[in-house]
Image (tube, helix red, strand yellow):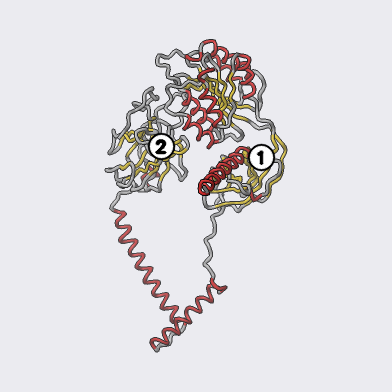
Amino acid sequence: MHTRLSYAYAVIAGILCVQASLVCAGEFQLLSVREPGPGKVIAKVSLAAGEVPAPEAFHLLFGDKHDFRAVEVRAAAASPVQTEVALVVDQSGSMGRSAVRDVKSAVQKVVSLPRPQITLALIAFGTRTTTLNGLSADIAQAGQAADKLKVEAASDGKTKFYEAIGGALTMLKASQAAGPKRVVVISDGKDEGSQIRAETIVPVSKAIGVTVNGIGFGRVANTTSGSLRDLAEATGGEFVLAHNSTELFDALDRLLSPVPATPTLDVVFEYEPSADGRWVKNALLEYKPIGQQGVRQVIAEAVAEPKPPKPPKPPVENGTPPDEEKGNLLTGLSQLFHFNFNFTFSAEDLLALLAGAITLFGGGVTYYYLVIVKGKEKEKPRIPPAVISQAPPPPPPERPRRSATTVSPVFPEPHEGKPAAILVATSGPVRGNRYAIDQATLRIGESASNDLCITGDDYVSGKHALIKYEWGSLYLSDLGSRNGTWLNGTRLARTAIALTPGDQIRIGKTVLELQSAQSRSGGEASQGMEPPVS
């Protein structure tokens, strides 16, 4: 009985911790960042809490090397917040012609009203997903694009409800604008053709802080909109079941209203910048109140790179400075030699002997490195630097152009037999081979220990590159290879880059094209799912 109670208390404590973390994430929002001078960063944030937090609650992070605590937090004037909204409209046959006409009328009426704090995109879906209007502060453009809404007459009727929402999340995730973001969906909730489900959408939505809001509408919405209601509740959004055009307009008008002006704070950081004046992107702002889990947001703006940290000083034991400790050591060694061998050495003699021993040791290390290590490296060909700078290798085949109106779907979570995507070798010694990305981490290189082993290419390193699945996206990074990893003709830096279908990845002389898991030939995704690839 005692064990059961302890387990129950532990579960309740875990739930409370998660709830506290979500509350913290919901109340904190990074709005903008400015840098009056190198080494001084001022981040404007909004907080739902009434009191101004202490500076210790805010941290500016540069990877794992620098963690700067805020030096000042001051209240700033409240200002309207620009809100980004992706409006996703169902035009599948199950909606019915009259319902789609009502949706078109409601969208055009709502966007005709002034909404200066709204940036809007319009996405339509049925058996395929199409962006009618990208994110724009001129929301009247969405009204003009709504003229294209019409019932889709498709033979298979496989509506891609979840893929359309995943595409909207991808669009908002890619936007660098600060401020709140939300997805608004008008649909009857039916889905027969998506390769992803709610289990993929919900964690992505929570990870990027975007809510999914739903308006159930259409001739069968009374019985089929439960999936949209559940998705809205799971992501912290709002759901409304509209029974007529008036209720539809009222719900859409409310969900497209801007976020009210909230009090903001200026969080000030100061640090010593690097001497070469370099700038870095993707620093992190962390808000971590006492007793709560930290929440981090990426700073899209470039800021001055901090000065490299100083190497740690040698430890001083028992309060003895290093110079005195060296003298004591030499004196002790002198006494030791005098006692055992009946020879008398001065401290200067011992210092000379130690210097000679160090010189011999250094010579041995140098010989080993130059003769043994470098000799082995010569066995593997290396692209000369002059060749790279003066005559770069021919660029990979031109990346296939994707339709400008097609929204890139969120990659499904990889499992054995159900890959997130496919890599097709288009050149090099493994040309024609197809590789399934059916695990969260895919290591690429010449070594047999890799998940994708490329042999016969002398310019591929043992551990060359890595593809990692995270929150519905695939990221490519180089593992410090000798000849680099190239994406669409550009050499990767240290930062991982998000991939999209059609990308060309060059590793040595091998080019791998990333294809959607449901793609049959590398073009637009087909309706069927590609069979597992070995």
Q: Is residue 94 visible?
A: yes
User: Please, which residue is most extreme toward the top here?
Assistant: 98
Kindly indicate the quadrant of the structure image that contains residue 106: top right
Q: Residues within 10 Å of mark 2 (few under 14, many from 20)?
A: some
Residue at 49% across, 13% down: 151
Q: Is residue 196 above or below residue 140?
A: below
The C terminus - image quarter: top left
Residue at 61% across, 33% down: 180
Q: Secondary structure at mark 2?
A: loop
User: Please, which residue is most extreme toward the bottom here?
Assistant: 342
Which of the pair 61/512 is nearer the observer? 61
Q: Which amino acid, mark 1?
A: Leu
List the residue tagged with mark 1.
47
Which of the pair 142/339 is nearer the observer? 339
Which of the two labelled residues, at mark 2 and mark 1, occupies the earlier sequence position? 1
Q: Nearer the viewer, mark 2 or mark 1?
A: 1
Q: Secondary structure at mark 1?
A: strand
Q: Which amino acid, mark 2?
A: Gly
Q: Position of residue 253 (x, y in %)?
A: 64, 21
The tally of labels here is: 2
Residue 21 appears left or right of 157: right
Q: Is residue 30 visible?
A: no
Instruction: Say the numbered circle drawn on residue 322.
Output: none
Which of the pair 375/3 is nearer the observer? 3
Q: Position of residue 425 (x, y in %)?
A: 32, 35
User: Please, which residue is most extreme toward the front here?
Assistant: 1
Q: Position of residue 525 (x, y in %)?
A: 39, 25
List the residue tagged with mark 2.
489
Residue at 43% across, 35% down: 499
| Distance CA(mark 2)–CA(mark 1) | 43 Å
